């Protein structure tokens, strides 16, 4: 077992023993290589460096009370990486190769999976980049696929406690017909200025609006947004929003709880009618929102007035976590065991 204070882990990088990597060259993927090297040797004219030809994923492995290692819904991550690759003209990683690489890297870093009960997990980061050189604006002919892992704690320092977020109107995360629905680095680069400013002004994250009209909720920085009201779980639907696997899972659990699920545009004005709101994603799972502050007009929408997460957010969070850690039945077949 690694010498780590598991309960003090933040969502950051901790060195582990190995990563795995493979290249697509001359029309085919090569064999998987196990490496202890934390750096990659890349051509200075690689398309990833000049034209942003790269995509990534994020998923987690969990240690159960029974000592078994569980990975949550990796198939959906593999499919999303394929969609991202196709969207920016990279060679897609076949699902079986994704699975083989993922299992290999987890098995070679078992000592870094946080113990059950610590609230931490092993974050798995697949990365696909255009490694072949081009000077003109065109796709690479060579690609590198790599997966590394690192133990992580909660994404927001508040953990599951309610957070404050800030609506921004002077920055856009993605264009209406751009790459917002893909998990590519450019979307995150475009969100950084607003995100850092929000942190500097005392907020956990920025909440983006649609780039075209600035009237509908888009994404909560690195996560999807959802709201609860009138027995409904409501989450925005737009081409500019990355389809979250966590959000997809929460919708299934919400229906199990008797909630009606609606995927539709959410106008900013509708925020005042929600009884609970939250941001969800692999990293944070659910971050209940305490306050949404509109930076432009100073309007504030408040939830969790007793300082605690609402009952539906709490139940959704606990149910999903129980499935991930093996404390509840996985009736959906979301879990893959690492033998």
Image (cartoon, helix red, strand yellow):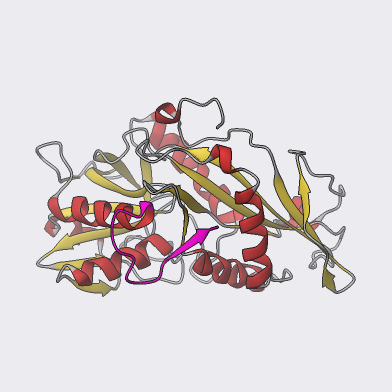
Q: Is residue 337 magenta?
A: yes
The image quadrant that residue 249 belongs to is: bottom left
Q: Residue at x 19, y 54 (%)?
A: 315
Of 256 and 139, which appears nearest the observer?
256
Residue 164, by quadrant, is top left
Q: Is residue 157 visible?
A: yes
Q: Which residues are magenta?
A: 325-339
Residue furthest toward the right?
26
| Magenta segment includes 18 | no
In the image: residue 236, left or right of residue 178:
left
Residue 216: percent from left, percent from top = 31, 63
Which secondary structure dominates the residues rendered in magenta? Answer: loop
What is the quadrant of the N terminus in the image?
top right
* Position of residue 184 measured from the top left corner of the image (x, y, whole percent): 60, 59
Residue visible at 30% across and 73% down?
263
Nearer the observer, 169 or 108: 108
The quarter of the picture where the C terminus appears is bottom right
**Relative to residue 26, is residue 147 drawn left or right?**
left
> Percent from the top left, x then y, of residue 66?
39, 49
Q: From the viewer's perspective, is residue 76 above or below residue 3?
A: below
Q: Position of residue 271 (x, y in %)?
A: 19, 56
In the displayed structure, 38 sits above or below 98; it is above
Q: Residue at x 43, y 53 (%)?
A: 282
The residue at the point 53 percent across, 54 percent down is: 58
């Amino acid at each position: 077992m690694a010498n780590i204070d598991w309960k003090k882990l933040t969502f950051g990088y901790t060195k582990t023993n190995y990563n795995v990597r493979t290249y697509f060259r001359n029309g085919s993927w090569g064999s998987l290589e196990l490496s202890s090297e934390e750096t990659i040797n890349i051509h200075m004219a690689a398309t990833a460096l000049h034209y942003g030809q790269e995509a990534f994923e994020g998923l987690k492995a969990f240690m159960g009370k029974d000592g078994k290692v569980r990975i949550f819904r990796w198939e959906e991550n593999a499919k999303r990486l394929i969609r991202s690759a196709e969207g920016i003209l990279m060679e897609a990683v076949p699902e079986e190769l994704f699975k083989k690489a993922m299992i290999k890297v987890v098995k070679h870093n078992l000592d870094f999976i946080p113990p059950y009960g610590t609230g931490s997990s092993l974050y798995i980061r697949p990365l696909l980049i255009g490694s072949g050189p081009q000077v003109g604006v065109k796709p690479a002919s060579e690609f590198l696929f790599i997966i590394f892992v690192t133990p992580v704690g909660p994404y927001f320092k508040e953990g599951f406690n309610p957070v404050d977020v800030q609506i921004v109107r002077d920055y856009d995360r993605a264009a209406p017909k751009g790459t917002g629905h893909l998990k590519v680095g450019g979307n995150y680069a475009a969100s950084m200025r607003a995100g850092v400013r929000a942190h500097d002004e005392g907020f956990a994250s920025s909440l983006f609006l649609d780039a075209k009209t600035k009237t509908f909720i888009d994404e909560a920085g690195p996560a999807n947004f959802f709201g609860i009201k009138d027995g409904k779980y409501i989450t925005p639907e737009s081409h500019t929003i990355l389809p979250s696997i966590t959000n997809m899972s929460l919708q299934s659990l919400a229906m199990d709880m008797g909630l009606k699920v609606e995927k539709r545009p959410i106008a900013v004005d509708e925020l005042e009618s929600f009884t609970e709101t939250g941001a969800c994603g692999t990293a944070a799972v659910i971050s209940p929102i305490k306050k949404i502050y509109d930076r432009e007009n100073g309007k504030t929408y408040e939830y969790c007035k007793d300082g605690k997460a609402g009952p539906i957010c709490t139940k959704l969070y606990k149910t999903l976590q129980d499935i991930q850690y093996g404390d509840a039945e996985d009736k959906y077949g979301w879990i893959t065991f690492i033998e």
